[in-house]
Image (cartoon, helix red, strand yellow):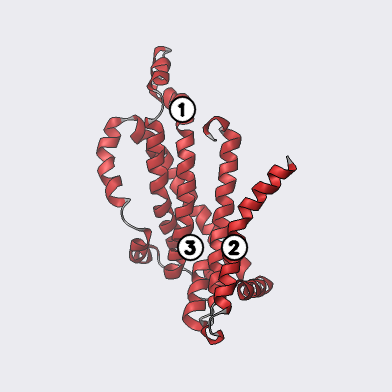
Amino acid sequence: MNRVRSARLLRNIASPIAFLVIWQLWGAAQPQRGGYPVPERVLLAAQELIRTGDLPIAFLVSIQRVAAGFLLACLIAVPLGLLMGYFRLVERNLDPLVQTFRSVAPIALVPLAIIWFGTGNISAIFIVAYGAVWPLLINTIHGVKGVDIKLVRAAQTMGLSRGQILRTVILPGALPSMFVGVRLAMGVAWGAIVAAELAVGAKSGSSGGLGQMMFLFYAYSVEMNNIVVCMITVGLVAFVIDRSLRALQALLMPWATR
């Protein structure tokens, strides 16, 4: 058993280690004056940003915005997806709007967000929510439509109302697909927050979040190592959240995971 675990661990870390080695060798071969980021310099930059508190503060600002936007997306997408998946009339009327707006990238809404809400938290949350709502909505609709019709008919023969069927049959049956939507939506949310903060984040210091920090490093000091630190932070946080969601799904729905 220990040998199997060791082999699995080795497989998991082999690719990251190989990537870091190639990255370090490539960077070492470049002219020093080019300022190419390499693992060694990025690590030192990360230590400095953590020591000064800039990175933790920016991280907290970004994750609060992502959490708020994601929660707003869930409050919109889950009820609407259940209704569109279960009631054909609702789907026929709303599907053209959904298919039209979900093709618009979140970054395209930045000018409207600034006009409507100004710069700051509300605009960033709005852009995150807009980006996250569509994958969650589509997967919720797909999950509802994928529920076995025999279960629905059995519930009808037992005299359950549409509301009861929706709550006791449709929702549990759609949960696996909804969890996939949650994972996709969270990934989109983390991608959208960087774009949102680049455009509408706070205008000073790291209080604008990771996206604003990246912009300041690029526009004023061209600190490539610091920019890479912010990029890695976004990626690592998204990875940890996705793994946590997968673990939660396995715990709540073991029949739906492999």
How crowded pointer 3 is (Cα within 10 Å; few <14, some 14-19, many 20+) is rated as many
Residue 62 in sight from this viewpoint: yes
* Mark earlier in primary sequence (3, 1): 3
Residue topped by disc 1 = 167
SS for tag 3?
helix
* Mark earlier in primary sequence (1, 2): 2
The residue drawn where x is 35% and y is 30% is 86
User: In front: mark 3 or mark 1?
Assistant: 1
The residue drawn where x is 45% and y is 43% is 181
Residue topped by disc 3 = 121
Mark 3 residue type: Asn
* Mark-to-mark CA distance, 3 and 1: 34 Å
The label on residue 18 is 2
Pointer 1 with pointer 2, Cβ within 8 A: no
Residue 197 pos. (x, y %) = 46, 67
Quadrant of residue 158 in the image? top left
Q: Looking at this view, is 33 or 192 the one in front?
A: 33
Up/down of 192 relative to 219, above or below: above
Mark 2 residue type: Ala
User: In front: mark 1 or mark 2?
Assistant: 2
The residue drawn where x is 41% and y is 38% is 140
Q: Looking at this view, is 119 or 49 the one in front?
A: 49
Q: Quadrant of the C terminus?
A: top right
Residue 205 in sight from this viewpoint: no
Pointer 3 with pointer 2, Cβ within 8 A: no
SS for tag 2?
helix
